[in-house]
Amino acid sequence: MASTGGTRPPRRSPMRVWPLVRVALGNGQLVVGAILLLVVLLIAVFAESLAPRAYDAMDLTNRLRAPGPGMLLGTDQFGRDTLSRIIYGSRIALRVGLIVVVIEGVLGVSLGLLAGYYGGLADRMISFLTDITWALPPIVLALAIVTVLGPGLNNVMIAIALVSWAGYARLIRSKAQGLKNMPFVEAARALGESDLSIMFRYILPNTFGLIVVVASLSLPGAILSTTALSFLGLGSQPPAPDWGVILSEGIRFLYDAPFLSIFPGLALVWTVLGFTLLGEGLRDILDPRMKA
Amino acid sequence: MLEYVARRLAMGVLTVLAVTVVLFLIMQLMPGDPIRLIADPDRIPPHQIEALRRQWGLDRPAHIQFIYWLVNIVRGDFGRSIVTGQEVRVLIATRMPFTLMLAVPALLLHYTLAVPLGLLAAIRSGSRLDRAIIVTTSALRTIPGFWLAILLMLVFAINLRWFPISGYQGPRSLVLPVLTLTLPMLGGTVRLTRAEVLETIREPFVLTAYAKGLTHNAVRLKHVLRNALIPVTVMFFLALPWLVGGSVIIENIFAWPGMGRLLWTAITNQDLPVVQGIIVIIAVLTVGANTIGDVISGMLDPRIRIELEEGR
Amino acid sequence: MKVMAAPPETAILQVDDLSVCFETSRGSVQAVSGVSFAMAKGEVYALVGESGCGKSTTALAVMRLVPPPGRIRRGHIRLGDEDLLALSDEAMADVRGRRLAMIFQNPLVSLNPVYRAGSQIEEAISLDSVPRPVAWRRAIEVLGRVRIGDPAERALRYPHELSGGMRQRVMTGMMISRTPDLLIADEPTTALDVTIQARILDLLMDLCSHSGMALLIITHDLGIVAEIADRVGVMYAGSLVEQAPVYELYEDPLHPYTRMLMRALPRLGKGQGRLETIPGSVPDLIALPAGCAFHPRCPERLAICASQTPVSRVVGGGRTVACHRGEVDR
């Protein structure tokens, strides 16, 4: 391992993007996932023009109407249009997923880098932190954190990020351990680069593929968990058109208005499936060894 | 081996201890005076509040409070619920059986479905059956548990009226919640089993087993399965706490009188002693299950045992 | 086209016109094409050649253990009076271990890590419906026979607790425990260091001379061949290009490829040579050159070599060779 490789960090040159795109197009999972997500993304961006009504516009004369002309997916107990609420809800789902992944990614990657690069005490402390995080099922730990922070979507996002950084940390740690003895890192050290600079300018760029794979694989989980907590009433609060909120309001009318409980779930599955396929496709292309 | 088990146990105790310390610190960091959760300062005169403070030990320094708290926990005393005044230990003891009533059957059902499916997929690897098994179980994973619960309710409780919609009304009530806990996680175990079997089949020692004259079935059973199922068995133990965690959501939907619902109620009521009690119990359960998993994997695989005995 | 070096009535193994191919996404790989040879009782026969020449696949085909996607496309394999390719899977499993056994290159990965050394031998012995305590006692005896010191204690060890040489002895013990008529050894010493190599070879030789077991040894090490083999078959690109009694082969190699192998040996007879530099490379088995597969690398090629595949001919004294030049010269 140590005898191969040049003295400069190996990076993909931008010229090689096209073959990568070709490989990506050849991966069925990735293409299907990307198409599913593109639909969600377009809906989220053009929500104002797509939604027939505002997500919080009430119409008390049309309460719990079954799907039909004028209200394609029916209305809820306040006469709000379910289709419009689901359309606006896509914004929350996408935003939540991205924010959670960014927070947990930054946390996990920096702790993983520290543990892998320095080893010793830093490594042991971070491993211990990981052990504590994993001493509770993630959803329970997230609930405990929400108890302390109080309910609300932002707090739920922080809680979910705090319970899921450890996965990144473990993978980045072992990658950094492998990289820190590579010739190009040793050369940088010999040239007097600081530890911080080595970590972020030499080691980090070589973990990008791994980070992209881990992040896209944990995106669906992030969306599912935050929606679940919103469903429990701890995340987004009414009248927000969060899919979890729509479902938790809808479940009260399971007998009279089952459609309220079906369509938001379908939207959620669509989105989660999109991210899952995209993530697995990316993994197959960027890091086939991770395939379990 | 004994020494190894002892060390694993010590590690486990240490982790649980660390969890309680962190838990205690977090609770200390909570904004506001905890006494307000017990008594409304606007309606109760200050001297009574002081008395309450003394009674609950809140006038002592934090580390003394922690030691008292810890000693009480070790003695099995988690305090009383702020809301109902009931002993937390009694609350947990009455709710725990209901949670296990869901988690244990779910775990058993999960493995009786997933392992044979994974095996079948591996033996027929590359066939249509293999694809079908993998695609179906993976698709189940993208369905959120709480939505699956709603769908099952709609179909089997409201339309077909086969099972009660919620609450505990005898064994038939178990069916829907157990299914909800089982189905979404199938994919992971199916894939794990399949991957391990496929990897083991390619091992040279399988060729040796054939070369010495064992039949197909003997090789599959004693050499492929025996080795491939080691990680699958370990996952069995790691899965139990996950199911207990998952039951928080499921119990709420099905109005199931278990620990998960108790936890959720306590969180919405800010009933700290109950929250703490449940979390410590779940941490003990999780760490205990991890430890058992480690010990079992050491018993099943002498290589791991050696590695662990020599200290990692 | 059938060529036999040992008379059929005393032959323990007889391979006729064996072809094995692997169906891959790139096409059909012809790993073994038309290989014929025979072995007498108690004989030590060495198959030699560069890696990828099909010698291991030939051995696995004899065991009927060619891994998928490979399959035996043509030919006959007879063990004594039994037609192995006609047997059912169960009957073949019964033949393995009892009449025909094989030891592999890397003894660490070829032993199951989760069973004790003794148990893995016991498992083989139990196939003869021997009660377990008896089988265990015999397993310990077998460990003694393969010269493992303190066999009762070593039987309780797991493979990773034993040294490389020790593991190969366990492997050998497991395979000879039911006294097969033929033992196949695929590069049995390649993964071991030199001093241990010699001891394992000694052991194999002794086992043969004491029990009358025949040994088919697969190797790329001509030093080993000189030391233990009675007869040698040289393989190139899936074909057997020459076979001869070992001394005749070393004295007077007939095939140009054999001659190149000999030249690559640093000091003949010192028993320590590896095949070294041979110009050109092993051909792609998917797209074999037309004619003689060796002709692109052959220093003595004729015009006919590029168009016509040479047929194996008997050239006296139980020797065969497949080369056009021989047809002209002799």
Image (spheres, rainbow, N blue to C red):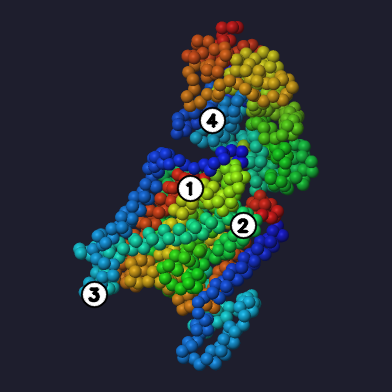
Task: Select label 3 or label 2 by which is in front.
Answer: 2
What chain does badge 4 belong to? Answer: C
Q: In this figure, which residue is indicated by the disc labeled 4?
A: C86
For marks 1 and 4, give the CA distance.
53 Å
What chain does badge 2 belong to? Answer: A
Please name whichever residue, B285 or A78, is drawn nearer the observer in this view of the structure. Answer: A78
Q: Is residue B165 left or right of residue C126?
A: left
Q: Is residue B64 left or right of residue A143?
A: right
Task: Select label 1 or label 3 by which is in front.
Answer: 1
Q: Both on one chain, marks 1 and 4?
A: no
Marks 4,3: beta carbons within 8 A? no
Residue B224, given in percent of the width and then of the height, sits at 57, 46
Q: Name the quarter where the N terminus of chain B is drawn.
A: bottom right
Q: Name the quarter where the C terminus of chain B is drawn.
A: bottom right
Secondary-structure class at tag 1 = helix
The label on residue A123 is 2
Q: Amino acid at mark 2?
A: Asp
For marks 4 and 3, give the CA distance.
82 Å
Looking at marks 3 and 2 on the same chain, the residue that comes earlier in the sequence is marked by 3
Q: Both on one chain, marks 4 and 3?
A: no
User: Which quarter of the picture shows residue A6?
Assistant: top right
Q: In this figure, which residue is indicated by the disc labeled 1?
A: A209
- Residue drawn 74% across and 30% down? C198
The label on residue A60 is 3
Secondary-structure class at tag 2 = helix
Q: Is residue B312 visible?
A: yes
